[in-house]
Image (spheres, coloured by chain):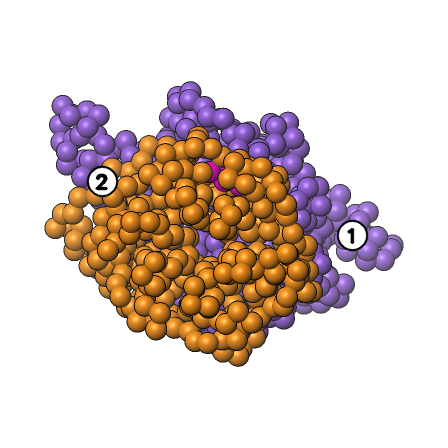
Chain colours: A orange, B purple
């Protein structure tokens, strides 16, 4: 389909926008006017195009992996050049919503609606899989993300009733779970993103609680920050999570259509994005990844693209 | 007249424009490979669609028979009953699908089981429409046959052997209506992960396929829906010829059939219990499933906090859509009583054309029209006023929800027209003629005769359209401006990810709202016509 023409502000439309803001609200929180240095993707079924991408991961060699709603996993160079793609073996029940590349370069896919984690090499050859459906130890409902600690152990987040993080050793042995549904401070509801902090913590986006949690490796809640809202320090359906080399956290907020940067204490260091289709704005960003050289890759899902920013 | 002019403007903008755009899309011969989507081959896709629609039709008819008999016997004395029976229609279909997906051990199913399950859920949503049609037949033919048969046999055999055969035209009409709507319905098969034409159309649109490719795929379900509607219309047309005579006799006699009738004696206790059972299964059970999975009561308030913007923008758009649909219905009323017969057919038929168009295609059609007009200054720079027209349509499409509102009118104006049409009978014509004979001018006829007579029905129709608009997701997804979110679309997105307190609370709010609103509508519908 043809895309929309560029918007032009007129006095009349400004007045109507003001009226709409008063009456119904226009979801445009204040944000820095950061512009991307690079954009790639676009809507479509061809190589390098996306149909509502929902997860992004960066490899140690700088390659970018993206999975979308056609269940294709596509690999790009760090500059957005399409390299290769492959499709999940099954996708009728649903498509993956989590991607992670471990230090060996293996691509781990949270195959959400098949209750498992699939493991591929960088060219899409399957290396293994684990997980079955259930609520028992080592079983999954809807897997959402994978993370790896310094010892090679894996953490798998899931929800759909389980709403927990399961821990596996480097050999794949189940070691325990934490989180879970409920009302306590450590209870989770839709843990969507995971990232391992070299300081020995696991950061988790607790999406439906609109917060980010910090857990010890054995699952003790060490702290959390965020509450539902659109102001600085507030979050609305945080999905994506990334840790920059300088120790700051990046959170992509699906509900606020923006990316927010925090320090490890949870203080907001900046916000950029906002609702829209123009460069620098987002529609339902599902993921964020931190690359070398200050690069930040934002998975702008509703606009079917990846926007790359440079942040010093 | 002003009201007529507004109605025609809305007809052109909300009905003719998107339908025209859909037709224009056929000129785009481009095609992209859809291998990545894993779409079923055309033959299998047709089988899937027919299976879902067939199951929905058959089971919807079965569910509707008790309520149809009950409404036909008692509704005019009990408007609340009419509202209660109709309320399942106003609950968003995705809420049904989400609730049933919470059933332990069931979840969502692919394959044949999923198709059948989707069909049953669709029947649970649509059966009230069939009940209304069956009720009109029960009132005129079924009840009499049933009562006569009761002299010789029990209630169930009287129903099966006497009443249902007498209701055959209305059963055909009800079946055609259910089939038409089920064929183009998207939300239920989408959540249940079944692949039918409606879901494949949206996949194509989301994948950025050329509009022509989308349009060619939409032809099949459109023709199926039109076929179902044509069967319904043809069946009802036959019946209406001799039913009009009954109306005249009732009007001449100054009595209204069924008013004040004792529902229990007319319908039988069995029908009351059966209707209650159907409501319990189709509304109560899904609501109960959601309540059982609702762990945090605070999420009800949080739902409004989280989705506050969505509620506000959706409610505003829905209210305007309802008002515009009522304007269209008023136009039909006016033409029916005052205009030549041919023009009535055109005015009244157009909304049904857009209502039967798959909503994805309707949305694509509107996008094409809006994009074409917003780019007029580039495509036709020499056209007088091209720049101003382009700026105007860009404003209407991208800056305010005008296109969104109009496409909702295109989707649902047929409902308001149907409600108004049912109320417009020979009594309206006779009343207008009487007023004119007394020397009333057009304005006096409108304000002192037609408006008091039809206001309740027009209001009810507009209210129904407003609530339906609130839950529409397909055309909304394509046409709503960036930054103006829809509550139905937002909740639909979250419904894919299992149990969610806020989603459950919001869904229960929609269920409760439908019950309350339809009780009010029932009173209006009972007073009108």
Is there CB contact under 8 Å for labels 1 and 2? no
Where on the picture, by quarter, is residue A243? bottom left
Q: Nearer the viewer, residue A78 or A304?
A: A78
Give the x, y percent position of residue B356: 50, 38
Q: Which residue is mark 1?
A: B159
Give the x, y percent position of residue B17: 34, 35
- Up the image or down, B352 lies above or below A215; here it is above
The kind of secondary structure the magenta stretch mainly shows is: strand
Q: CA distance from mark 1 to mark 2?
A: 63 Å
Q: Which residues are magenta?
A: A70-74
Instruction: Look at 51% across and 48% down and name the residue there.
Output: A104
- Name the disc covering residue A34, or none: none
Q: Is residue B256 visible?
A: no
- Name the disc covering residue A6, or none: 2
Left or right: residue B336 compared with residue A150: left
Q: Nearer the viewer, residue B290 or B77?
A: B290
Identify the secondary structure beneath mark 2: loop
Does A49 lie within the magenta span?
A: no
Instruction: Look at 51% across and 63% down and name the residue there.
Output: A190
Quarter of the image for the N terminus of chain A: give it.
top left
């Amino acid at each position: 389909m043809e895309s929309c023409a560029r918007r032009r502000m007129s006095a009349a439309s400004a007045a109507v926008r003001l009226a709409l803001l008063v009456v119904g609200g226009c979801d445009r929180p204040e944000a820095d006017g950061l512009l991307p240095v690079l954009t790639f993707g676009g809507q479509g079924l061809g190589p390098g195009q996306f149909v509502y991408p929902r997860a992004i991961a960066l490899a140690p060699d700088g390659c970018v992996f993206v999975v979308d709603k056609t269940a294709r996993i596509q690999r790009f160079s760090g500059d957005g050049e399409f390299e290769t793609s492959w499709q999940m073996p099954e996708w009728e029940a649903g498509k993956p919503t989590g991607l992670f590349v471990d230090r060996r370069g293996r691509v781990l896919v949270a195959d959400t609606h098949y209750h498992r984690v699939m493991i591929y090499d960088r060219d899409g050859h399957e290396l293994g899989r684990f997980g079955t459906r259930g609520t028992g130890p080592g079983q999954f409902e809807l897997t959402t993300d994978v993370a790896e600690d310094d010892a090679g152990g894996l953490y798998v987040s899931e929800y759909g009733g389980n709403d927990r993080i399961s821990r596996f050793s480097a050999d794949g042995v189940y070691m325990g779970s934490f989180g879970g549904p409920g009302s306590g401070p450590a209870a989770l509801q839709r843990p969507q993103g995971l990232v391992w902090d070299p300081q020995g913590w696991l950061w988790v986006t607790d999406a439906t609680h609109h917060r980010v949690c910090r857990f010890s490796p054995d699952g003790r809640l060490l702290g959390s920050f965020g509450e539902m809202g659109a102001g600085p320090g507030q979050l609305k359906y945080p999905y994506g999570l990334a840790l920059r080399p300088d120790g700051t956290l990046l959170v992509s907020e699906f509900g606020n259509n923006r990316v927010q940067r925090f320090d490890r204490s949870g203080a907001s260091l900046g916000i950029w994005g906002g609702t829209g289709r123009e460069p620098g704005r987002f529609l339902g960003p599902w993921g964020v990844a931190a690359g070398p050289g200050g690069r930040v890759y934002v998975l702008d899902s509703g606009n079917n693209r990846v926007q790359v920013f440079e942040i010093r | 007249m002003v009201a007529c002019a507004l109605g025609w403007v809305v007809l052109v903008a909300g009905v003719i424009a998107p339908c025209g755009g859909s037709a224009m899309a056929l000129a785009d011969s481009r095609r992209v490979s859809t291998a990545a989507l894993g779409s079923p081959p055309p033959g299998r896709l047709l089988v899937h669609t027919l299976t879902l629609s067939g199951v929905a039709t058959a089971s919807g008819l079965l569910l509707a028979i008790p309520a149809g008999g009950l409404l036909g016997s008692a509704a005019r004395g009990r408007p609340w009953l009419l509202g209660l029976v109709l309320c399942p229609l106003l609950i968003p279909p995705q809420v049904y699908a989400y609730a049933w997906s919470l059933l332990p051990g069931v979840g969502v199913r692919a394959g044949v089981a999923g198709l059948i399950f989707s069909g049953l859920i669709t029947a649970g949503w649509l059966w009230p429409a069939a009940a209304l049609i069956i009720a009109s037949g029960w009132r005129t033919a079924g009840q009499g046959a049933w009562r006569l048969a009761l002299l010789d046999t029990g209630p169930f055999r009287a129903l099966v052997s006497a009443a249902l055969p007498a209701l055959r035209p209305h059963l055909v009409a009800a079946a055609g209506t259910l089939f038409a709507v089920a064929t183009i319905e998207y939300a239920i098969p989408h959540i249940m992960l079944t692949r039918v034409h409606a879901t494949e159309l949206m996949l194509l649109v989301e994948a950025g396929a050329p509009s022509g490719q989308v349009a060619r795929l939409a032809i099949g379900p459109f023709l199926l829906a039109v076929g179902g509607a044509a069967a319904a219309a043809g069946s009802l047309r036959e019946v209406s010829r001799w039913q009009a005579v009954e109306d005249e006799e009732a009007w001449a006699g100054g009595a209204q059939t069924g008013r004040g009738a004792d529902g229990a004696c007319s319908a039988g206790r069995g029908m009351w219990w059966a209707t209650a059972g159907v409501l319990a299964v189709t509304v109560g059970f899904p609501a109960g499933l959601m309540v059982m999975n609702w762990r945090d009561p605070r999420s009800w308030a949080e739902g409004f906090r989280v989705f506050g913007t969505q509620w506000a923008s959706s409610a505003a758009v829905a209210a305007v859509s309802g008002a515009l649909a009522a304007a269209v219905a008023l136009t039909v009323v006016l033409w029916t009583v005052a205009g030549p017969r041919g023009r009535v057919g055109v005015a009244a038929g157009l909304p049904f054309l857009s209502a039967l168009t798959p909503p994805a295609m309707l949305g694509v059609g509107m996008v094409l029209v809006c994009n074409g007009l917003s780019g007029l200054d580039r495509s036709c720079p020499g056209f007088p006023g091209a720049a101003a027209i382009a700026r105007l349509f860009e404003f209407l499409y991208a800056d305010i929800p005008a296109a969104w509102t109009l496409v909702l009118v295109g989707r649902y104006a047929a409902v308001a027209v149907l409600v108004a049409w049912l109320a417009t009978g020979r009594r309206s014509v006779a009343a207008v003629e009487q007023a004119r004979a007394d020397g009333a001018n057009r304005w006096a006829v409108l304000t002192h005769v037609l408006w008091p007579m039809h206001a309740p029905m027009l209001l009810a129709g507009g209210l129904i359209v407003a609530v339906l608009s609130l839950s529409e997701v397909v055309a909304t997804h394509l046409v709503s401006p960036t930054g103006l979110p829809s509550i139905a679309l937002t909740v639909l997105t979250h419904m894919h990810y299992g149990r969610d307190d806020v989603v459950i609370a919001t869904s229960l709010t929609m269920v409760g709202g439908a019950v309350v609103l339809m009780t009010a509508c029932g009173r209006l519908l009972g007073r009108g016509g």
